[in-house]
Amino acid sequence: MTAITIPLPVPFPATLVILLSVVAFIVSQIPTYLRRRAFIKANALQPLQSAVHTLEPFLGLDLMYTAVRHAQRGYYNRFSASRFAAHGTTFATNRLLFTTLHTIEPENLKYMLATGFENYKLSSIRVKAMLPLFGQGIFTTNGDQWAHSRAVLRPSFTRQNMRPLLEMMERHWASFVKCVPADGTVFDIQDLFFRFTMDTATEFLMGGSTGTLEGGVGESAGFVEDYMDCCFEAVRKIAMGPLGFFARTPKSLDDARDRAWAYVDGFVDKALARMEGRKKGDGVEYNFLEELAQQTRDKTFLRTQVLNVLLASRDTTAALLGNMFYLLARKPEVYKRLRREVVSRIEGEVPTEDEIHAMTYLRWCLNETLRLYPVVPGNTREAARDTMLPLGGGPDGKSPIFVKKGTPVLYNVYAMHRRKDLYGEDADEFRPERWDGLKGGFHFLPFNAGPRICLGQQFALTEASYVTVRVLQTFDKLFAHDDRPWVEQYSLVMCSKNGVQISKDDSRANANPIRSQLRAGLYRYTGEWTLGANGTIKPRWGFGGTRGQPMGTNYGNSVD
């Protein structure tokens, strides 16, 4: 019997499949290539003048490692400024096979944020990191969705609606003063600023304060802690860059987010209940949430906008105040002049809005603080389509450059604000007098610019001015009780990682155990932070030495 052999079908050669796929891809890219070449020619775009060459040229892992190391030490923005000093005001890097542009050119920022606004959008990395807590709000959306959120929020930040702020702040100021040691011992005033602004922001936004200055118990204390935990998780994912897309959020943080949402939802429900049968303008005290509810009854939308504005109104103001008083405590001549202006202009104990706005030197001090330590020191935009930037190309870097769709563009305001060609040879010094005649522009961006300029800018400056005036009225002098240099705590905003340790009596210096043990070389800041009660940020301390040196002796080293 002869066996019948059935021939098997010959498999289609795999190499041919791959070849055809490559050819198909190349053909599909021809129209894009021709369109981009025509765009480059029409706009006279030139090759980028500068790029950072890394040891590992494909993924840029060595550059990412260096950046993370400096961020952990609290020197990320100083490191970033040093890169601009070495490579120019606009350069490129490779991260995970993607080209990333970096710039501190005012003209480039003007184009991205204003004149070429439609060509750029929020970074996808930032949006994905912030969505879990903040939802589809003004800080996480683009296009029509963003425009709708902004249009709904804008009426709530008119000057008329800002007027009740001072009365509300005065109530919380009484609680602030109670937290200041009466005997003149050292305390962390930045901690009090974050608690004060949380209390005022939640009352302004939701009609109910968290009461952290009063000890904050129950749901209020839990909300603050949950909110801060979720903010730090967002920062972690943003810092991871493209790798953040693969990061998993622990279930405990999902639970924290749900509790934070539930807390805000409770105020949303109360606001909607009070709105029933109430007519607008019936004389009730202003409430942001109820004002917003005049335009929509969408509970998710209301909660989302409250959380987005809470970030803008609370965190930015507290960071600004902490940074400014860190500087004022070390510049007694500036503090003296500023206090003289306050005492000479304010007739009563409580400042009025007009009195605050009339204080020129106060405005200079706020501007100078925002210049040296911008509360949002860096940001990112992503090219929404094939576009350009006005500067960075050609041999001298003065020609426009091509920016491919999807390219992230990082701009570092901290580094730009310290450019000596923009602010003089003393750009690293705190000198409020430089603002005598100095005008703003795209070289000074403490609150962003263009259509996305911060809606809460007036809120933040009014509150910061009010608190500054009240502190100056309370303290004849301020004394710094921390010998370490300023180190950044960079979360969603930038503040002093070590807090701001001050007193009103220099004779109480020995009452600060941190200072005395630092001088003895026995105690040091570990470079880490921990979350304290009421959502406050606390430095983590430790005994012993590092690399054979006593702790406390290795501060002030330059960024390597």
Image: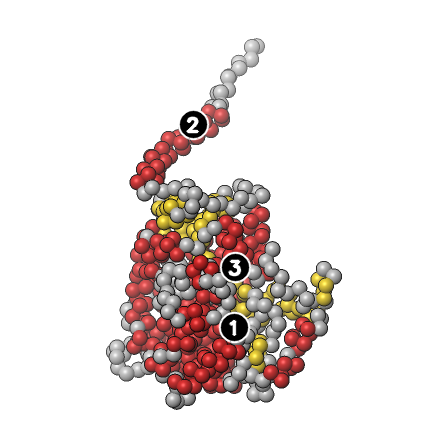
Determine whether, in the image, residue 117 is placed left or right of residue 173.
left
Looking at marks 3 and 2 on the same chain, the residue that comes earlier in the sequence is marked by 2
Q: Which mark is residue 77?
A: 3
Q: Are marks 1 and 2 in contact (CB under 8 Å)?
A: no
Q: Nearer the viewer, mark 3 or mark 2?
A: 3
Q: Which mark is residue 93?
A: none
Q: Quadrant of the N terminus?
A: top right
Q: Is residue 323 visible?
A: yes
The amino acid marked with disc number 1 is Leu
The amino acid marked with disc number 3 is Asn
Determine whether, in the image, residue 547 is placed left or right of residue 216.
right
Residue 515 falls in image quadrant: bottom right
Residue 174 percent coordinates (x, y): 47, 86
The amino acid marked with disc number 2 is Leu
- The answer to which of 274 and 40 lies nearer the viewer is 40
Q: Quadrant of the C terminus?
A: bottom right
Name the residue at 49% across, 56% down: 238
Name the residue at 45% across, 44% down: 49
Label 1 – label 2 distance at C-alpha: 65 Å
Residue 103 percent coordinates (x, y): 44, 53
